[in-house]
Amino acid sequence: MIIVHITNSLAGGGGEQMVLQLAKQSSPTIRTIVFSITDVNTIENKFKAHQIEYYFLGINSFRNKTLIKGLKKMHLIIKDLPNVVFHCHQFHGCLLGMVYNLRYSKPIVFTLHSSTVKSFSRKMLLFLTKPLRKKDIIFSSNAKQWFLKNSDIIPNGVDFKALSYNTQRQFESPNIFSFLFLGRLSDEKNPLFMVLAAEHLIKSGMTNFIIQVVGDGFLYDELSKKIKTHHLDAHFNLVGFQSDIKPYLDSSHCLILPSLWEGMPIVIIEAAAAKLPIIATPVGSIPDFLNDSNATVSTLNHFNSAMIQVMQHYEAALLKANKLYTEINSTFSIENVYNKHLHLYKSIV
């Protein structure tokens, strides 16, 4: 069996990180090939380091000649391979896989990696092309959508052993509470909200905090400008994209995720593996795994108060983090998640 992952890019988002994790688990007897539709290569070094076979297709639009060239390049690589299974990730990965499938029939598994598709035309396209796909993967039963088919429930996973820690956390400034925002600086992650949150904390008399922002994206410049405009430089540290997030997980007090919409964020599982307390909004599949007994789940209206609550009652937050780790360390381990994917691939060959 040959597993072919089609992803929009090798950027540092959750979908791309999941492709990396699945490809790393492949055994010597199962060949795995990763195709990146675009040439974005933020985490290419990780694919190289683990000797994962990958190719860039150089498609910058589905309306010009680069689409034809990219399809031809992919076909030349896989045309003679037996028992090929396509695992298409995100909307454009699915679209490319289905375009290829119109001429060369290959079984397709699709993971959307989000609970929201804003465009109705995209929803209709996914609905009308259900016959071209064998299975669609969702992260929880509540993530079912009318435009997805035969949904199999398989959550995202991470390497718990690589992210765990055996000693007490080491904070740069013991008297400064360190919040961690880890993710792409884009609309769905709602990073600009952190400026409002910081102002609220200060007005409430909570000034001993910093927000570490680990990630990049098109909102980076706007976030940086707002921080300066509101004179909040002392309370933010924008470090950009980091290929190794473990030092930030180990040196922070709490992960914050004020998302507007999500699928199943990898960062939540990474924080859980590091036993890091979490504050998150109840969007996507998050409420299926997080609750007030193992994390702090809060709407945006009360998110600022939730941050203050965790600062003031940190020991309780740590107990919740330990409970979450115990609850999910087997279900969300990458070994278990990969085996579920492998069973699905074999069932449709």
Image (cartoon, helix red, strand yellow):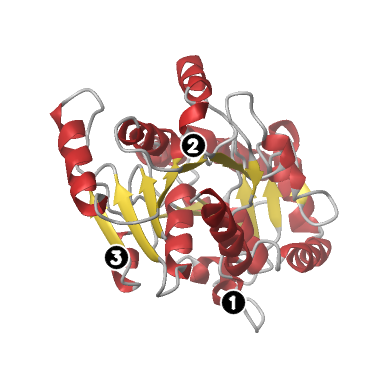
Q: Seen in the image, is 142 located left or right of residue 175? A: right
Task: Please state the total of marks drawn on the protein image.
Answer: 3
The amino acid type found where label 3 is placed reads Asn
User: Residue drawn at (48%, 51%), measured in percent from left and top?
Assistant: 349
Secondary structure found at label 3: helix
**Residue 198 horizontal/vertical position (percent):** 60, 43
Where residue 298 appears, x then y in whole percent? 75, 40
Dot 2 falls on a residue whose secondary structure is loop
Left or right: where does residue 73 sit relative to residue 142? left
Towards the viewer: 170 or 284: 284
Cα distance in 3D space between marks 1 and 3: 21 Å
Residue occupying the point 77% across, 66% down? 318
Q: Which residue is mark 2?
A: 230
- The nearer-to-camera label among 2 and 1 is 1
Q: How far separated are the C-alphas under marks 2 and 1?
A: 40 Å
Q: Which mark is residue 161?
A: 1
The first of marks 2 and 1 along the sequence is: 1
Residue 195 position in % (x across, y down): 54, 39
Residue 45: numbered disc: 3
The amino acid type found where label 1 is placed reads Lys
Q: Are marks 2 and 1 in contact (CB under 8 Å)?
A: no
User: Closest to the observer: 213 or 153?
Assistant: 153
Residue type, numbered disc 2: His
The secondary structure type at the circle numbered 1 is helix
Give the residue displayed 39% in from the left and 61% down from the top.
Answer: 242
- The image quadrant that residue 151 belongs to is top right
Of the pair 292 and 301, the residue shown nearer to us = 292
Q: What crowding class fits label 3: few (fewer than 14 Cα within 10 Å), some (14-19), or many (20 or more)? A: few
Mark 2–mark 3 CB contact (< 8 Å):
no
Q: Nearer the viewer, residue 345 or 37?
A: 345
Q: Distance between the Cα atoms at labels 2 and 3?
A: 37 Å
